Image: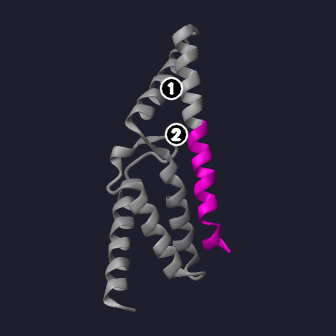
Amino acid sequence: MSSEQITRLHNAEQIVQDYGRLLGTITLGAYAHPGSLLPHTKDQIKDSIQLLLREIGHENTDIKNSLVEAYVLLAKFISEEDAALLEKGREALSRGEADCSFIEEAGNATKIINNIKLEMENLTEDLKIFLN
């Protein structure tokens, strides 16, 4: 392995560790989180996880499964605007007030949640090469 490959691997490990620390501090059951919480860009985290999955291969199943889960959870990190809209929808539902703003806020929240689910499916598709 060249020194450049070793450096890339080390950087990927650091990025994934930073992301893992974040995942340890948030509520994973929540629908979404503001993307500004991420310690690195989504693309940097994706690339790093993919690199580590390539290096691990089919060994270390527990680590591999954790990386796959972390990769898919990236879908839950959304724009600040969408996170605010989702929170408004959640608040509207908790108030239980059925008026025009309720319907609009609930509709916006539903669209965002559906987009998150779709992105999770797409991220899972991305990883099929590593799961076989």
Q: Are discs 2 and 1 less than 8 Å apart at CB?
A: yes
The image quadrant where one finds the C terminus is bottom right
Which residue position holds label 1? 90
Q: Is mark 2 on a helix, strand or loop?
A: loop
Residue 94 percent coordinates (x, y): 52, 20
Q: Residue at x 51, y 66 (%)?
A: 67
Task: Give the residue drawn at x 57%, y 68%.
Answer: 65
Q: In this view, does 87 lie to the left or right of 123?
A: left
| Residue ranking furthest to the bottom | 1
Residue, disc 2: 31
Residue type of the residue flagged with mark 1: Arg
- In the rendered view, does 65 fall on the left or right side of 24? right
- The residue segment tinted magenta is 114-132
Place of residue 20 in the rendered image (x, y in percent of width and height, measured from the top left): 40, 61
Please tell me which of labels 2 and 1 falls first in the chain: 2
Give the position of the N terminus as an image quadrant: bottom left
